[in-house]
Amino acid sequence: MNLPSEILVEILSRLPARAINRCKCVCKTWLELFSNPEFVALHFARARPGLVVHQSEMFKNFMKLVEFEDEINHHDLDDASLVKLDLTRLSEFSDANIVLDGSVNGLLCLRDTNYEHETVYMCNPITREYVRLPAPEGVVRYPSIATYGFGVSRVAGEYKVVRVFHDQVLDPISQNCIRIPHSECYVYTLGTGSWRIINGEMSNFAYSGRNRSVGLFFNGNVHWLIQDLDDTHELISCFDLENEVFQPFPSPFQGRQELLVSLGVLQDHLCLCDNTSYFEINIWVMKEYRAKESWTRQYVISKMTELIGPTFEVVYPLKVFKDGVIMVLWGDFFMLYCHNKSEFGQQVDIEQPQGPNRIEAMLHVSSLLSLKTFGLENVSNF
Protein backbone atom coordinates (compact mmCIF):
# COMPACT_ATOMS: atom_id res chain seq x y z
CA MET A 1 0.00 0.00 0.00
CA ASN A 2 1.38 3.39 -1.02
CA LEU A 3 0.61 6.17 1.43
CA PRO A 4 0.28 9.81 0.31
CA SER A 5 3.55 11.64 0.89
CA GLU A 6 2.06 14.06 3.43
CA ILE A 7 0.80 11.15 5.57
CA LEU A 8 4.15 9.40 5.31
CA VAL A 9 5.91 12.56 6.48
CA GLU A 10 3.49 12.84 9.41
CA ILE A 11 4.28 9.29 10.49
CA LEU A 12 8.04 9.36 10.00
CA SER A 13 8.50 12.77 11.63
CA ARG A 14 7.17 11.32 14.90
CA LEU A 15 9.68 8.47 15.06
CA PRO A 16 12.63 8.69 17.48
CA ALA A 17 15.83 9.90 15.83
CA ARG A 18 17.46 6.56 16.50
CA ALA A 19 14.71 4.79 14.52
CA ILE A 20 15.06 7.28 11.67
CA ASN A 21 18.71 6.30 11.33
CA ARG A 22 17.72 2.66 10.87
CA CYS A 23 15.15 3.66 8.24
CA LYS A 24 17.69 5.42 6.02
CA CYS A 25 18.53 2.18 4.25
CA VAL A 26 14.90 1.38 3.33
CA CYS A 27 14.95 3.28 0.05
CA LYS A 28 16.57 6.25 -1.68
CA THR A 29 13.39 8.33 -1.33
CA TRP A 30 13.45 8.02 2.45
CA LEU A 31 17.17 8.74 2.57
CA GLU A 32 16.61 11.99 0.67
CA LEU A 33 13.62 12.87 2.85
CA PHE A 34 15.58 12.51 6.09
CA SER A 35 18.15 15.07 4.90
CA ASN A 36 15.53 17.56 3.71
CA PRO A 37 15.83 20.73 5.87
CA GLU A 38 12.05 21.04 6.26
CA PHE A 39 11.74 17.44 7.46
CA VAL A 40 14.72 17.86 9.80
CA ALA A 41 13.08 20.94 11.35
CA LEU A 42 9.67 19.22 11.66
CA HIS A 43 11.20 16.13 13.26
CA PHE A 44 13.16 18.24 15.76
CA ALA A 45 10.04 20.20 16.73
CA ARG A 46 8.32 16.91 17.61
CA ALA A 47 11.27 15.20 19.30
CA ARG A 48 11.03 14.21 22.96
CA PRO A 49 13.38 16.10 25.28
CA GLY A 50 16.01 14.20 27.18
CA LEU A 51 19.52 14.27 28.58
CA VAL A 52 23.02 13.83 27.33
CA VAL A 53 24.96 12.06 30.08
CA HIS A 54 28.74 12.05 29.85
CA GLN A 55 30.57 9.59 32.07
CA SER A 56 34.28 9.01 32.45
CA GLU A 57 35.98 6.18 34.29
CA MET A 58 39.50 4.82 34.34
CA PHE A 59 40.42 4.23 30.67
CA LYS A 60 36.78 4.84 29.64
CA ASN A 61 35.02 7.90 28.28
CA PHE A 62 31.50 7.48 26.97
CA MET A 63 28.34 9.46 26.37
CA LYS A 64 24.70 8.39 26.47
CA LEU A 65 21.52 9.98 25.16
CA VAL A 66 18.27 9.21 26.99
CA GLU A 67 14.75 10.62 26.73
CA PHE A 68 12.41 11.64 29.54
CA GLU A 69 9.21 9.88 30.46
CA ASP A 70 7.30 12.84 31.90
CA GLU A 71 3.95 11.78 33.32
CA ILE A 72 2.41 12.41 36.73
CA ASN A 73 4.22 10.19 39.25
CA HIS A 74 6.21 8.62 36.41
CA HIS A 75 9.29 10.38 35.12
CA ASP A 76 12.01 7.81 34.61
CA LEU A 77 14.60 7.94 31.86
CA ASP A 78 13.58 5.89 28.83
CA ASP A 79 16.29 3.24 28.40
CA ALA A 80 14.77 2.17 25.08
CA SER A 81 15.84 5.49 23.59
CA LEU A 82 19.43 5.12 24.77
CA VAL A 83 22.27 5.89 22.38
CA LYS A 84 25.79 5.22 23.64
CA LEU A 85 29.00 6.58 22.10
CA ASP A 86 32.64 5.89 22.92
CA LEU A 87 34.38 9.29 23.06
CA THR A 88 37.87 7.78 23.14
CA ARG A 89 37.49 7.44 19.37
CA LEU A 90 37.42 11.23 18.95
CA SER A 91 41.06 11.83 19.85
CA GLU A 92 44.27 10.09 18.89
CA PHE A 93 45.71 10.95 22.31
CA SER A 94 45.40 8.34 25.04
CA ASP A 95 45.46 11.05 27.73
CA ALA A 96 42.63 13.09 26.19
CA ASN A 97 40.20 14.52 28.76
CA ILE A 98 36.92 15.09 26.92
CA VAL A 99 34.29 17.29 28.59
CA LEU A 100 30.84 18.50 27.54
CA ASP A 101 30.64 22.23 26.80
CA GLY A 102 27.14 22.61 25.38
CA SER A 103 24.08 21.11 23.69
CA VAL A 104 22.07 23.12 21.16
CA ASN A 105 19.47 21.83 18.69
CA GLY A 106 20.90 18.31 18.74
CA LEU A 107 24.52 19.37 18.29
CA LEU A 108 27.11 18.91 21.04
CA CYS A 109 30.22 20.96 21.74
CA LEU A 110 32.94 18.74 23.23
CA ARG A 111 36.44 19.68 24.30
CA ASP A 112 39.69 17.95 25.14
CA THR A 113 40.92 19.99 28.13
CA ASN A 114 44.44 18.52 28.19
CA TYR A 115 46.80 21.51 28.08
CA GLU A 116 49.14 19.77 25.66
CA HIS A 117 46.52 19.33 22.93
CA GLU A 118 43.41 21.37 23.73
CA THR A 119 40.86 20.61 21.00
CA VAL A 120 37.24 21.58 20.39
CA TYR A 121 34.84 19.20 18.64
CA MET A 122 31.37 19.67 17.23
CA CYS A 123 29.32 16.50 16.89
CA ASN A 124 25.86 15.09 16.31
CA PRO A 125 25.57 11.83 18.25
CA ILE A 126 22.58 10.71 16.16
CA THR A 127 24.23 11.06 12.74
CA ARG A 128 27.55 10.10 14.40
CA GLU A 129 29.28 12.97 12.62
CA TYR A 130 31.94 15.14 14.19
CA VAL A 131 34.21 18.01 13.23
CA ARG A 132 37.51 18.94 14.85
CA LEU A 133 37.69 22.75 15.01
CA PRO A 134 40.97 24.56 14.30
CA ALA A 135 43.22 25.03 17.32
CA PRO A 136 42.25 28.20 19.22
CA GLU A 137 44.82 30.86 20.03
CA GLY A 138 46.11 31.43 23.53
CA VAL A 139 47.67 28.35 25.08
CA VAL A 140 46.26 27.60 28.52
CA ARG A 141 48.93 27.40 31.20
CA TYR A 142 48.24 27.64 34.92
CA PRO A 143 47.01 30.01 36.29
CA SER A 144 45.46 31.21 33.01
CA ILE A 145 41.97 29.92 32.24
CA ALA A 146 39.82 29.34 29.15
CA THR A 147 36.05 29.03 29.36
CA TYR A 148 33.71 28.10 26.53
CA GLY A 149 30.10 28.50 25.48
CA PHE A 150 28.05 27.25 22.54
CA GLY A 151 24.81 28.55 21.07
CA VAL A 152 22.91 29.82 18.03
CA SER A 153 22.20 33.45 17.19
CA ARG A 154 18.58 34.60 17.34
CA VAL A 155 18.23 36.22 13.89
CA ALA A 156 20.89 34.82 11.56
CA GLY A 157 20.69 31.33 13.04
CA GLU A 158 24.47 30.98 13.12
CA TYR A 159 25.97 28.35 15.42
CA LYS A 160 28.86 29.80 17.39
CA VAL A 161 31.46 28.63 19.89
CA VAL A 162 32.70 31.33 22.27
CA ARG A 163 36.08 31.10 24.00
CA VAL A 164 37.04 33.51 26.78
CA PHE A 165 40.73 33.33 27.65
CA HIS A 166 42.37 35.30 30.42
CA ASP A 167 45.50 35.41 32.50
CA GLN A 168 45.03 35.53 36.25
CA VAL A 169 46.97 36.85 39.21
CA LEU A 170 46.26 34.66 42.24
CA ASP A 171 46.42 35.46 45.93
CA PRO A 172 49.43 33.44 47.20
CA ILE A 173 47.53 32.22 50.27
CA SER A 174 43.91 31.69 49.20
CA GLN A 175 44.75 31.04 45.52
CA ASN A 176 41.73 33.14 44.59
CA CYS A 177 41.92 35.36 41.53
CA ILE A 178 42.65 38.97 42.51
CA ARG A 179 43.44 40.55 39.13
CA ILE A 180 43.00 39.92 35.40
CA PRO A 181 45.92 41.55 33.55
CA HIS A 182 44.91 40.27 30.12
CA SER A 183 41.72 38.89 28.53
CA GLU A 184 40.67 37.88 25.04
CA CYS A 185 37.43 36.61 23.51
CA TYR A 186 37.32 34.48 20.36
CA VAL A 187 34.28 33.32 18.37
CA TYR A 188 34.11 30.42 15.93
CA THR A 189 31.10 30.43 13.61
CA LEU A 190 30.34 26.94 12.36
CA GLY A 191 31.13 26.73 8.65
CA THR A 192 33.73 29.52 8.51
CA GLY A 193 36.81 27.47 9.36
CA SER A 194 38.48 30.03 11.63
CA TRP A 195 38.32 31.82 14.98
CA ARG A 196 37.77 35.59 15.17
CA ILE A 197 38.90 37.83 18.00
CA ILE A 198 36.15 40.02 19.47
CA ASN A 199 37.10 43.55 20.42
CA GLY A 200 35.33 44.97 23.41
CA GLU A 201 35.49 45.71 27.12
CA MET A 202 36.12 42.52 29.14
CA SER A 203 36.47 44.33 32.49
CA ASN A 204 38.03 42.87 35.61
CA PHE A 205 35.79 39.80 35.75
CA ALA A 206 36.83 36.42 37.15
CA TYR A 207 35.10 33.35 35.73
CA SER A 208 34.43 30.78 38.41
CA GLY A 209 36.37 27.55 37.93
CA ARG A 210 34.44 25.82 40.70
CA ASN A 211 31.32 25.47 38.56
CA ARG A 212 33.24 24.26 35.50
CA SER A 213 33.17 27.65 33.74
CA VAL A 214 30.87 26.25 31.04
CA GLY A 215 28.66 28.83 29.37
CA LEU A 216 24.89 28.30 29.54
CA PHE A 217 22.94 28.98 26.34
CA PHE A 218 19.55 30.63 26.84
CA ASN A 219 17.46 33.15 24.89
CA GLY A 220 20.07 33.63 22.16
CA ASN A 221 22.85 34.43 24.66
CA VAL A 222 25.62 32.53 26.45
CA HIS A 223 25.85 33.06 30.23
CA TRP A 224 28.59 32.51 32.80
CA LEU A 225 28.80 33.18 36.52
CA ILE A 226 31.48 35.78 37.17
CA GLN A 227 32.80 37.92 40.00
CA ASP A 228 33.52 41.61 39.56
CA LEU A 229 36.93 41.89 41.20
CA ASP A 230 36.56 45.66 41.57
CA ASP A 231 33.64 45.44 44.02
CA THR A 232 33.36 41.67 44.78
CA HIS A 233 29.81 41.46 43.39
CA GLU A 234 28.55 38.25 41.84
CA LEU A 235 27.34 38.87 38.28
CA ILE A 236 26.10 36.94 35.28
CA SER A 237 28.14 37.53 32.15
CA CYS A 238 25.88 37.56 29.10
CA PHE A 239 27.34 37.29 25.58
CA ASP A 240 24.89 38.25 22.83
CA LEU A 241 25.56 35.81 19.97
CA GLU A 242 23.85 38.02 17.39
CA ASN A 243 25.72 41.27 18.12
CA GLU A 244 28.78 39.63 19.75
CA VAL A 245 28.91 41.92 22.79
CA PHE A 246 29.07 41.28 26.54
CA GLN A 247 26.20 42.60 28.65
CA PRO A 248 26.56 41.48 32.29
CA PHE A 249 23.62 41.73 34.69
CA PRO A 250 23.20 41.18 38.46
CA SER A 251 22.63 37.90 40.23
CA PRO A 252 20.56 37.82 43.46
CA PHE A 253 23.77 37.43 45.51
CA GLN A 254 25.20 40.91 45.89
CA GLY A 255 28.42 41.19 47.88
CA ARG A 256 28.74 37.45 48.59
CA GLN A 257 31.77 35.39 47.60
CA GLU A 258 32.81 31.75 47.48
CA LEU A 259 29.33 30.54 46.61
CA LEU A 260 28.49 27.00 45.53
CA VAL A 261 26.24 28.21 42.74
CA SER A 262 25.38 27.02 39.24
CA LEU A 263 23.38 28.43 36.34
CA GLY A 264 20.50 26.52 34.77
CA VAL A 265 17.19 26.76 32.96
CA LEU A 266 13.98 25.50 34.58
CA GLN A 267 10.60 25.78 32.83
CA ASP A 268 12.04 28.23 30.30
CA HIS A 269 13.42 30.60 32.96
CA LEU A 270 17.02 31.33 33.86
CA CYS A 271 17.80 30.02 37.34
CA LEU A 272 20.57 29.84 39.95
CA CYS A 273 21.02 26.84 42.23
CA ASP A 274 22.78 27.63 45.53
CA ASN A 275 24.29 24.81 47.63
CA THR A 276 26.15 27.08 50.06
CA SER A 277 23.89 26.24 53.02
CA TYR A 278 24.65 23.17 55.14
CA PHE A 279 20.98 22.18 55.33
CA GLU A 280 19.17 23.13 52.13
CA ILE A 281 19.37 23.79 48.43
CA ASN A 282 17.99 27.15 47.26
CA ILE A 283 16.93 27.63 43.65
CA TRP A 284 16.39 31.20 42.46
CA VAL A 285 14.36 31.80 39.28
CA MET A 286 14.50 34.92 37.10
CA LYS A 287 10.84 35.46 36.24
CA GLU A 288 11.57 38.23 33.74
CA TYR A 289 14.77 37.84 31.76
CA ARG A 290 17.49 40.37 32.67
CA ALA A 291 15.22 42.11 35.21
CA LYS A 292 17.12 42.22 38.52
CA GLU A 293 14.00 42.67 40.66
CA SER A 294 12.40 39.52 39.20
CA TRP A 295 14.78 37.08 40.97
CA THR A 296 12.60 34.84 43.16
CA ARG A 297 13.67 32.10 45.55
CA GLN A 298 11.22 29.54 44.20
CA TYR A 299 12.50 26.25 45.64
CA VAL A 300 13.93 25.52 49.09
CA ILE A 301 14.86 21.84 49.26
CA SER A 302 15.90 20.20 52.51
CA LYS A 303 18.95 17.96 52.25
CA MET A 304 18.93 14.30 53.13
CA THR A 305 20.69 13.54 56.41
CA GLU A 306 23.78 12.12 54.72
CA LEU A 307 24.20 15.33 52.66
CA ILE A 308 23.88 17.80 55.55
CA GLY A 309 27.00 19.70 56.56
CA PRO A 310 30.00 21.35 54.89
CA THR A 311 30.16 20.63 51.19
CA PHE A 312 32.26 21.62 48.23
CA GLU A 313 29.82 20.35 45.61
CA VAL A 314 27.94 22.49 43.12
CA VAL A 315 24.40 21.25 42.38
CA TYR A 316 23.09 21.59 38.82
CA PRO A 317 19.31 21.79 38.22
CA LEU A 318 18.30 19.82 35.12
CA LYS A 319 14.52 19.60 34.82
CA VAL A 320 11.18 20.18 36.54
CA PHE A 321 8.70 17.42 35.71
CA LYS A 322 4.93 17.86 35.34
CA ASP A 323 4.29 16.78 38.94
CA GLY A 324 6.85 19.25 40.33
CA VAL A 325 9.68 16.76 40.88
CA ILE A 326 13.09 18.29 40.13
CA MET A 327 16.03 16.38 38.70
CA VAL A 328 19.48 17.66 39.74
CA LEU A 329 23.09 16.65 39.24
CA TRP A 330 25.00 16.56 42.54
CA GLY A 331 28.56 17.67 41.80
CA ASP A 332 30.30 15.26 39.45
CA PHE A 333 28.94 12.18 41.16
CA PHE A 334 25.24 11.32 40.82
CA MET A 335 21.79 12.55 39.80
CA LEU A 336 18.88 12.88 42.21
CA TYR A 337 15.12 13.40 42.11
CA CYS A 338 13.86 16.07 44.54
CA HIS A 339 10.29 15.23 45.56
CA ASN A 340 7.48 17.61 46.49
CA LYS A 341 9.81 20.62 46.15
CA SER A 342 10.83 20.13 49.77
CA GLU A 343 13.33 17.29 50.18
CA PHE A 344 15.67 15.04 48.26
CA GLY A 345 14.30 11.70 47.15
CA GLN A 346 15.85 8.76 45.36
CA GLN A 347 18.85 8.57 43.10
CA VAL A 348 18.18 8.59 39.35
CA ASP A 349 18.27 5.06 37.98
CA ILE A 350 21.16 5.26 35.54
CA GLU A 351 24.52 3.54 35.50
CA GLN A 352 26.96 5.57 37.58
CA PRO A 353 30.74 5.84 37.06
CA GLN A 354 32.92 3.78 39.35
CA GLY A 355 35.74 5.23 41.42
CA PRO A 356 36.99 8.84 41.65
CA ASN A 357 35.73 9.92 38.25
CA ARG A 358 33.04 12.22 36.96
CA ILE A 359 29.60 12.49 35.44
CA GLU A 360 28.19 15.42 33.46
CA ALA A 361 24.60 15.89 32.32
CA MET A 362 22.65 18.54 30.44
CA LEU A 363 19.38 18.86 28.58
CA HIS A 364 19.46 17.57 25.01
CA VAL A 365 16.99 17.07 22.18
CA SER A 366 18.14 14.71 19.42
CA SER A 367 18.27 16.04 15.87
CA LEU A 368 18.91 14.81 12.32
CA LEU A 369 20.86 18.00 11.50
CA SER A 370 23.97 17.03 9.54
CA LEU A 371 27.25 18.85 10.07
CA LYS A 372 27.67 18.74 6.29
CA THR A 373 24.86 21.32 6.16
CA PHE A 374 27.40 23.93 7.23
CA GLY A 375 29.67 23.25 4.24
CA LEU A 376 32.39 21.72 6.37
CA GLU A 377 34.79 19.49 4.44
CA ASN A 378 36.42 17.73 7.38
CA VAL A 379 33.32 15.94 8.67
CA SER A 380 34.24 12.53 10.11
CA ASN A 381 32.22 9.68 11.59
CA PHE A 382 32.63 7.73 14.81
Image (cartoon, grey):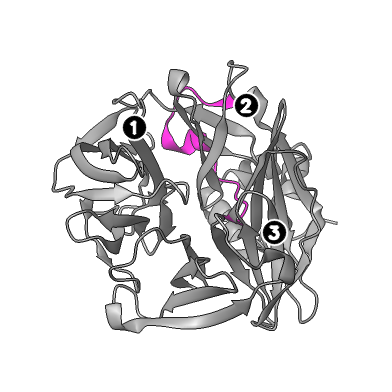
Which residue is denoted by mark 3 in the rendering?
A: 335
The quadrant the C terminus occupies is: top right
> In which quadrant of the rendered view does residue 56 lie?
top right
Crowd tier of the residue under label 3, counting other residues whose Cα lies within 10 Å: few below 14, some 14–19, many 20 or above: many
Q: Is residue 369 magenta?
A: yes
Q: From the viewer's perspective, is the residue at label 2 or at label 1 nearer?
A: 1
> Circle 2 sits in a helix, a strand or a loop, which is it?
strand
| Gap between marks 3 and 1 measured at Cα | 31 Å
Residue 208 falls left or right of residue 361: left
Q: Is residue 78 above or below residue 141?
A: below
Q: Is residue 334 above or below residue 63?
A: below
Q: Is residue 309 above or below residue 34?
A: below
| Gap between marks 2 and 1 measured at Cα | 35 Å
Residue 337 is situated, as x and y percent measured from the top left of the image, at 71, 69
Amino acid type at mark 1: Pro
Which residue is denoted by mark 2 in the rendering?
A: 381
Residue 227 is situated, as x and y percent measured from the top left of the image, at 29, 56
The quadrant the N terminus occupies is: bottom right
Earlier in the chain: of badge 2 and badge 3, it is 3
Earlier in the chain: of badge 2 and badge 1, it is 1
Q: Please give the label number shown on residue 251.
A: none
The residue at the far front in this view is 173
Which residue is denoted by mark 1 in the rendering?
A: 143
Q: Is residue 354 magenta?
A: no
> Circle 1 sits in a helix, a strand or a loop, which is it?
loop
Q: Which residues are magenta?
A: 363-382
| Gap between marks 2 and 3 measured at Cα | 30 Å
Earlier in the chain: of badge 3 and badge 1, it is 1
